[in-house]
Image (cartoon, coloured by chain):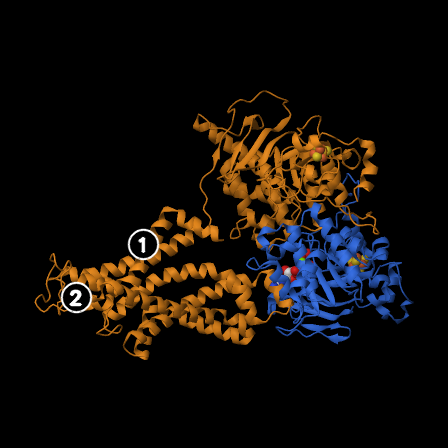
Chain colours: A blue, B orange
Amino acid sequence: MSELRFDDVTVRFGRGGRALTAVDGVDLTVPSGQVVGLVGESGSGKSTLARAAVGLAEPAGGQILLDGVPLRHRPGARRPLQMVFQDPYSSLDPRMTVGDSIAEAMPRGARRRDEVVRLLELVGLDADRVSAYPGALSGGQRQRVAIARAVAGQPDVLIADEITSALDVSIQGTVLNLVRTLQRELRLSMLFISHNLAVVRYVSDIVAVMYLGRIVEVGPARDVLGNPQHPYTKELLAAAPRRGSTALPPPDAVADAEPADPHHPPAGCRFHPRCPVGPLIRTDREHCLTLDPTTEADHRLHRAACHHAAGVLRAVGSNPPVLMELKEDSL
Amino acid sequence: MRTRWIAVLRTPVGAGAGLLLLGVLLLAVFAPVLWSHQANAIDTDHLLQGSSAQHWLGTDNLGRDIFYRVLVASRTSILLALLATAIAVVTGLALGSAPAILGKRGGRAAIAVVNIAVAFPGLLLALFFAVVFGVGAKGAVLAIGFAGAPSFARLTQTLVAGVAERDFIAAARIAGVGRFRMLVRHILPNIAEPLVVNATIGAGGTLLAFAGLSFIGLGVQPPAYDWGRMLGESLSGIYVHPAAALAPGVAVVIAGLAFNLFGEAVAKGLGVQVPRARWTSRTPEAVPARDSDAVLVVEDLQVSFPGPVTPVRGVSFTIRKGEIVGLVGESGSGKSLTALAVAQLIEPPGQVTAAELSFLGAPLLGRLPVRSTAATRRRLLGTSFAMVFQDPMTSFNPTKRIGVQLAEGAREHQGLSRRAAMNRAIDRLRAVRVPAAERRAHQYPHEFSGGMRQRAMIGMGLMGTPALIVADEPTTALDVTVQRQVLRLLETIRSEDDVAVLLISHDISVVAEICDRVLVMYAGRVVEDLPATELATGARHPYTRALLAAVPDLDTALDEPLAVIPGRPVDPARLPDGCAFAARCSFASDRCRTEDPVLVDQVACWHPQAQAEYSSFRTGQR
Ligand SMILES: Nc1ncnc2c1ncn2[C@@H]1O[C@H](COP(=O)(O)OP(=O)(O)OP(=O)(O)O)[C@@H](O)[C@H]1O
Ligand code: SF4
Ligand code: SF4
Ligand SMILES: [Mg+2]
């Protein structure tokens, strides 16, 4: 039971002209014992954020804190964060038995044999799978082993990066059920990454929406999905399939624009080239082209990074006058 | 793994090389034990003699029998070569895996050392080290070993880098596995195979190199002798006693070849080989006149592979003009194989058979009697048939501009000029709503985002005037929003040009939204064929219903576990008698387990569920 906090975390790849800021000043908290679902389109930086947390990517700025203490990653030392990867076909060593893979992640001194068997049973696999090689398991079974391995490390926080997207729909359900049960039983704090809103909705207490390296909206799952503030969240919700829907939602000219180039993120609001209520549609919203909506996000409902998000937490008195004027203009 | 090595020994080359190598090794072990005496016997009466009945290959300057000496020398020659190889491999491994152990800075230094060392020719290095370590067997072993190390180091580096990218390495790091253990437990086992193969091939080369050093007197010193030294000593008399000089040479070549061939055979056997495809039809040329609207008629299609397995076993369907048909099912159910069979893309040794497989009334299967017909068929497929794959990155050539790739097909199939083809390519890119089409046409595939590449792929299909687009999981790798765009594009194309679409997906909710009709596949069969509008309420096959219930959506109840389909998909190699779904079906009866249901009245099930039972089924299945 621990709280994971990203404090203004930035991750960059490359240098000079080819540099790319995959994660740009992200603030996000995974409260103790809760599941934060992170959604966003491909390339928005979700995996990069997760990899930074477990020490696979080096943040260029900001801090990642566990219970208020900055995380340190030393090779060979126990890691309080564990991660389950997207592709169960590459995340298990093909030359190692299931039992060895799980045992390896255990803290020193654990009673390995019994513990491995207990973990296998915990994730719903037969104890005799201990000596099986990953090659003999199906995708769903491998993903169970990967989950068992992550839990074996007795993590304070578990990170799950698209753990069901490589699986068939018929198997997805069992893995999601397992994750949910485990999380509740072990009272794990969890960062659950997926691009599937329905899946995130099912497992998360809190939902965070990421767009081009930034969190554009975050709040309790029910509220964010029931009362989305940011136009991008609304778009994601509109695009998610509903039970029994037999027609595509009506086309949306702006949303169909090409995704932004992460090497050259748009100025002002990063979403403006695709925003259906933004400057390309409503000429009175030109300030979206230049003013970054993330700076004032803390004052808005769900910390929405949008100048025109409906809900405001408190009076905008503390806002810079520029913004005030523009808002009056736009009325 | 072990079985693959055994398979290598079953091939003629593998078996031959293996036997040869075994022979050479046995000789090295036993020759000195058996024949040392004969080889060292000095016969002063027969100095430097030619071949005779007593001395097959003659004698040397002390009258010793050359034939026996060649045999006995095998141990020294091979042992020293193996020792040198071992040094090369161990040093190479240490240098090559140093980056994995030392961390960033030390790793960079190790890489730099290897880069410099690799730049020197091996022979030069060997001579350099031979001088450094001094003349003699020990010096030569060290010299050749170290000279061979850089190339192994480079190989190791490449292999390690390949493995280090994989997620299981990242997982082990997160689990707190130390660097050394990482190398020993995770990296080395996964690169051992190519290393062993290369070391075997390398041993052949080392043998030659060693013979070379001994030949010029830098290697084995008297009284010890190896093939290289024997060659050197008898060379002066080569015109008088050719056999004495040739014999050790031949021995070196044979032993070297044994190592080399064996290594090559293993390397080849562990790789994958692809022979050519065979297409057969049970009733070639028999195309019954049908419904003139039919674009694609598939009747009892089967795809099988040696094993034998038949992952597609009797699929039948018809797609009409302007119809969007969805094909859903879990992985391994045969969806993609069905599509590939239709597109004539089944890779051998796969085999495709069908009672009928015809496209726009023309048969796609069977040998065609006249050459022109074959060309017609190719042209028909080239212009009227389009295929869109899941990952367009692998379907585009990364080194060619998108526009050029689109234009290529049009020039070939429609005989357009370069200019006209390029214009059409730009026009088609515009049609699939690639922004700034003119500029984009001059870009390379990697400069396109995933969604845009997918559109360009569809644009490529539209270069001709397709009657059918087969799209295999075209949106699986994409985000919901981009996914929508691609689906919408397919729908637009259908309504504007009356193009038929076969859309393959494992995601039944995607299919429901855009298709007219849905075919549900399970274990190589179509188990239900129903209008998309009836999916939500009118599905009758238990599998279709379970599939629908298993997909969470924005209305799924949060306080209950998700509905799941119990059990596992069937292995196509081990199909049960009766209904393939029986083990996972809650309605299965004894009849289901013995009799295989066929598609009757759009559903292949002995107990199709009535539409009214639907709601009770959904709650009952949880
Ligand atoms: N090692 C790397 N070097 C350079 N760029 C990278 C690297 N890894 C990721 N990126 C870039 O960083 C950005 C964010 O990538 P990331 O993998 O975090 O996205 P994501 O949100 O997880 O996407 P997906 O849903 O496709 O997994 C992308 O533009 C990606 O191309
Ligand atoms: S700030 Fe402007 S452009 Fe950005 S999301 Fe809000 S309305 Fe759209
Ligand atoms: S035939 Fe029997 S086992 Fe097969 S799906 Fe129908 S009810 Fe289930
Ligand atoms: Mg990712």
Residue situated in front as seen by the camera: B227 or B106: B227
Residue where numbered disc 1 is placed: B20
Q: Which amino acid does the dot numbered 1 rest on?
A: Leu
Q: Is residue B427 visible?
A: no
Which element type, helix, strand or loop, lies under badge 2? helix
> Which x, y percent locates residue A106?
66, 67
Q: Residue at x 46, y 51 (%)?
A: B4
Of all residues shown, which one is farthest toward the right?
A: A315
Q: Which mark is residue B540?
A: none
> Which x, y percent locates residue B197?
42, 58
Q: Quadrant of the C terminus of chain B?
A: top right
Which element type, helix, strand or loop, lies under badge 1? helix
Residue situated in front as seen by the camera: B101 or B390: B101
Q: Which mark is residue B235?
A: 2
Ligand 3, image quadrant it occupies: top right
Left or right of B166? Residue A159 is right
Disc number lying in front (2 or 1): 1
Q: Which amino acid does the dot numbered 2 rest on?
A: Leu
Of all residues shown, which one is farthest toward the top?
A: B289
> Which x, y percent locates residue A126?
67, 53
- Judging from the image, mark 1 belongs to the subunit labelled B
